[in-house]
Image (cartoon, grey):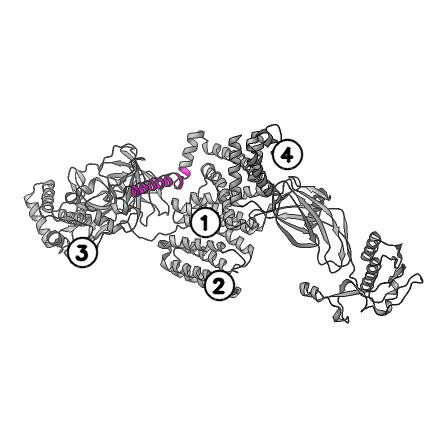
Amino acid sequence: MSSKFPVWYYSTSVFVWLISLILIDDFGVGFTGLVSVLMLWQTIRIFTTPTILSVRFINVVTLLGAVTTASLIGLKNSVNVFVALMLIASLLKQIHATKANQFTQICILNFFTYPCLFLFTQSLFAALLVLCMLAVNLAIMLNLEQNLKLKPALKVSIKGLIIVLPVAAFLVVFLPKLPAFWQLPQPQKEAKTGLSENVDPFDIVSLSQSEELVFRATFENEQIEGPYYWRAIIHDEFDGKRWKISEYQRTNMKPPPLDEGEHATIIAQPSHIPWLYGLSYSYSNNPKLNSNVFGTVYLKSLTSKPIEYSIMVSDFSPESTLKPWYYQRNVKIPKGFNPKTTQLAQTWAMSSSNTSEFIEKMRLYFLNNQFIYTLTPTPSQSDNRVDEFLFNTQNGFCGHYASAAAFLLRSANIPARLVSGYLGGEQNKNQGYYSVYQYDAHAWVEYFTPGVGWQRLDPTAWIAPERMTGSLSQLAQLSNEFQQGLGYSLIAFSNWHSINWVRLKLEELDYQWTRVVINFDRDKQSKLFKNWFGKYGTLWAGIISLLIFAILSVILFFLVNYIRRASPPIELAYYNDIVRYLNRDSHSGSVRQNIQELTQLFPENEKVLWQFYALFEKSQYQQKPLSKTELKKLKTLYRQIKKKG
Amino acid sequence: MFKRLRAQVKQHIYKKHQSSELTFSHSNIYILPSKDGFFFVTVALINFILGINYQNNLILATSYIMAVIMVVVLFIAFFNFNNAKIQYLGAEDNFSPYHPTLNLKLSSSSEIQSLRLTSEYNHTPSHIPIIQDEIQIALPITNLSRGKYETGTIKIMSYFPLGLIRTWSYLRPNDVFYIYPTPLPLDEKEQQPSHIPDKNETLSQQQDSASEFDHLTLYQKGMSLSRVAWKHYAKTEQMLVKTHNSNGHFSNQTVFDYDLLLGTKEERLGKLCTQILDADKQQAHYAIKLKQLRIPLGSGNAHKQKCLEALSEF
C-alpha cells in the first residue's frame, strides 16, 4: 500500500484530524483522541510495510469506531454525531483503500466532509482552510487520472479553483435563495464562556478573560453616546447567594408600534444562550427575535451562525409606581443573610430623605474604605458573602460591587435588580463599528425611583471610573492582570504596535466577512434585488443570473481553450519574439537561416545569437528539456539580443 | 424493446464513425459524467440542500463550486479530444497464441492527456498517459482463437482531467484481421509431404541434430523437453518448442494436403501452418489443398499470406 500511492494522498486524513481538532469544543477531547489514534495507526501503516486488512476486520473497526463516536458525543447532538461519523468514515475508508478508484471516492466524499466544518464555524479562517483542503483534494484527483506530481497537480488545482471561485461567488449572490426546504437540527455548542444566567460573583476565584468575540455593533447615526451598557440578562431574584435570571426574561412582549428612538445594528456571534444584547430599552422587529418587558431581546431558537439584527433604542419610559406584587418581587431578600449589611443599609435609609442620598452614602462608603477593583478577588464561601465583602475583603470585580449594591438597595426597600451584559467595546476607527469581547462582560444594578422609573447604577464605576470609557483591553491599570488571564493570543500582545495593527486589520476583515458573506441571507438578497431591479427584483435577478451564468459558461469555454493553447515552450516564445522584433520581413526560413539573416543585420550581436541558437537547437532536437541553468542562460541571451537590437 | 432501441441507436452512431480516419470534433465526441461523476453531482446536490436548509452561504458556495468544476471539467474534457486525429494503419496478423494487433496513429497539435483505447475484442484498455504531436499505438487483441475477424469498433476514451467525465469516440475501420493457426510439429510419418515427384527428393532422418533452428511452436505433451525454449519460458511462462528444419527437405514444388495429415481439425491446420512456414523459409514453391479449396502453386510473402489466411478462415 505504501509503495503504490504517493504519501501526500494521506494528507486527507491529516485534514480530518485538523477538523476534529478545530471542533474539539463541540466534539470533546474523547473524539479528537479517537481520531488522533486512528491517524497514528494510519501513519504507522504508511511508513512500515503493512498487512492488507481484511474486509471483516475493517467492518469491525468501523462498527467500533461508530459506536465509540456516538457514545463519546451523545446521540442527542444529532448533527455533531453525524459529522463526527462522517469524519471517522472518511478516515477509515482511507486506511483500507488499496485501489485508485477508492481514493477517487474518498476525494469526492471529502467534498462533503470538509464543508461540514461550516456547520460549526463560518469564520474566514475556516473558509480558507476548507478551500486549501479542497485544492489538495482536487490535486489528488488530478494525480489519480494524470500521474502529475504533487507540485504541478497542486498548481493546476489552485489555478482551477481561482477560475471557479468567482463564478461560484457570483452564483451565491445572484441565484435567488430558496427558503429552507425543511427544518434540520442545529449543531449544539458547548457552553464555554459567556454570561451565566445565575450570578454568584463570590464563587469566582479569577475572572476568566476570554478574547472571544461576542458581538459587533454599528449605530445608524452617532447619537447614542457612551458609555455603552449592553444589557443582556436581568436578574431579579436573590436567593441569598445567587442572583437568578428573571422568570419574565423569556416572556415575549409585542414591541411598541412606534418607530422612535435610535437604531443600532448588531451582529452577534452564536452562543449557547438565547439572550441578545441591547442598549437601555431596546426592541427588535426581526422575525427571529422576541422582545421582553425588560427591554431586552432574545432569540426564538438558537442558531450556530452569527445573527444580524437591528434594535430600536429608547430611554426607559417614566413610571410613577410599581405594581405591589412587582415591587415586592424587587425588594425581596431572603431572611437571615448578611445581617451587618442589612443593618448598614437600614442606618443609611434612616438618615436619607430620598434614594439619591442613599446612593451617595453608598458611594462614599466604597470610596472612603479604599475598595479595590481586581480580577482576582479573595473568594468567599461563607453564607454572609456580602458582609464579608463590604467589611473584610473589600476587593472584587463588577459582580461583587453590583451584587453588594443591589443587596444594600433592597435592604432599604428600594426596588433593585442585577443586570449582566457587556460594557463598552473596542471601536474600529476605519469602519466605525464596535467590537465587544467576552472580557467586556460586566454587571451593574438598576433601581426604581417612583416618578422616574428604572435607572442604571454602576457601583464599579466609583472604584474604577476608567472602566466606563473604554474596553477592558484599553485599561492601563489592570493591563498586567488582564493579560495574564488571556494566555496566548494576539490581543495579549496588543502593547506591541505592529501586532496590534495586524490584530485590528484581521478583526476588520472578519467583520466584513461576517456582515457581507455569512449574513447575506434571503432578506438581504431580496432587498438588493429590489434596489437594483425594482418590484419584481427577484424574478429579474433570477432571469438575469441565469443569462449571465450562460455567458460565463461561454467565457469559461473559451478560457479553457485559450489556456490549453497558450503554452508554447518558452524557448519558442523567445525565438519568435526575437525574429519578430529584429526582422519583421522574414518568417519563412528555417531557424538557422533566420538566425543567419539576423547576424548579417546585426553583426555586433553575432556571438550572442549563435549562442542562443545553440541552446535553442538543443531544446528543439533533444528529447530532454533544458535544465534550469540553461533556461536561465537562454533568458539572459534573449535579453541581451533584444537590448542591442 | 429497450435492447433493440439501444442497438438501433448504436448502429446510427456507428455510421458516423465508419472510416479508417477520424478528426475529433463536436459532432463525434461524446461526453457524459462517469460513475464517479454522478457521485460527485450527488454530493454537490446534498451540499446544496444542506446549504439551503441551514441557510449557510459557505456550504452553498461549496456546492456551486462543485457545479462549476463539473462544467469546467466538461470543457477541458472536450478540448482534450477536439481536433485530434486518429488513423487506422492496419492490423498485424499473428499466430494463434500470440496477439494480433491493430495499429493506430494518433496526432494532435496540442497535448492529449490520459487516453484509454479498447477494441471490441479486448476490453482491458491500453492507457496512454500523454500524447505530444504524434504517437503510434499497437492495440493488442487477446483471447481470440484462429479465424478471420472484422476489426470492429475501436473505442477511444478518457476520464481526463478528474475522472468525473467520460469522453469517448469510436473508430470503425472497415478491415479484417486474421489469427493463424498455431504451428504444430509434424509427426514422423507425416514428414514426407505429398509432392509432385521430383528427383531432388531426399529423406532426412537426422532432423533433430543437424538442422537449423527455425521457429517456435507451442509445446505439447510428448515432445522432447530438450527442445523447449527455456529462455522464452522464463520470460513469458509459455512453453514453446524449437522447431528445427533441415535443409533440402522440400522439393521445389510441393502440395500440402489437409487430408493427408493426422489429428483433429486444429491440429491438422497447425501442421499445415508449419509446413507452409518451412516451405516459405526455403523459398520453395508450394500449393495447399484444403478439402475443396485449393491454392495453386506459388511462393513469396504474398503467397504465404494468402495460404495462412486460407488456413485461418477454414
Kind of residue sitting beneath label 2: Thr
Query: Between residues A163 and B133, which one lies in front from this camera angle?
Result: B133
- Vertical comparison of A556 with A404: above or below: above
Q: CA distance from mark 2 to mark 4?
A: 59 Å
Kind of residue sitting beneath label 1: Met
Query: What residue is disc 1 on?
Result: A133
Query: What residue is disc 4 on?
Result: A593
Q: Secondary structure at mark 2?
A: loop
Residue shown at 50% from the left, 52% from the top: A109
Disc nearest the viewer among 3 and 1? 1
Kind of residue sitting beneath label 3: Pro
**If you read the primary sequence from the N terminus, does the residue marked by circle 4 or circle 3 appear first?**
3
Kind of residue sitting beneath label 4: Gln
Q: Secondary structure at mark 4?
A: helix
Callout 2: residue from which chain? A
Q: CA distance from mark 2 to mark 1?
A: 26 Å
Q: CA distance from mark 4 to mark 1?
A: 52 Å
**If you read the primary sequence from the N terminus, does the residue marked by circle 4 or circle 1 appear first?**
1
Task: Locate the C terminus of chain B and report the quarter of the image it occupies.
Answer: bottom right
Instruction: Indicate left or right for A202 with B268 as reference.
Output: left
Q: Secondary structure at mark 3?
A: loop
| Residues at marks 2 and 3 touching, judged by CB atoms closer than 8 Å | no
**If you read the primary sequence from the N terminus, does the residue marked by circle 2 or circle 1 appear first?**
2
**If you read the primary sequence from the N terminus, does the residue marked by circle 2 or circle 4 appear first?**
2
Q: Quadrant of residue A223?
A: top left
Please check whether the numbered discs 2 and 4 fall on a single chain.
yes
Residue B263, percent from left and from top: 83, 67
Instruction: Indicate left or right for A394 with A218 as reference.
Output: left
Q: Secondary structure at mark 1?
A: helix
Please check whether the numbered discs 2 and 3 fall on a single chain.
yes
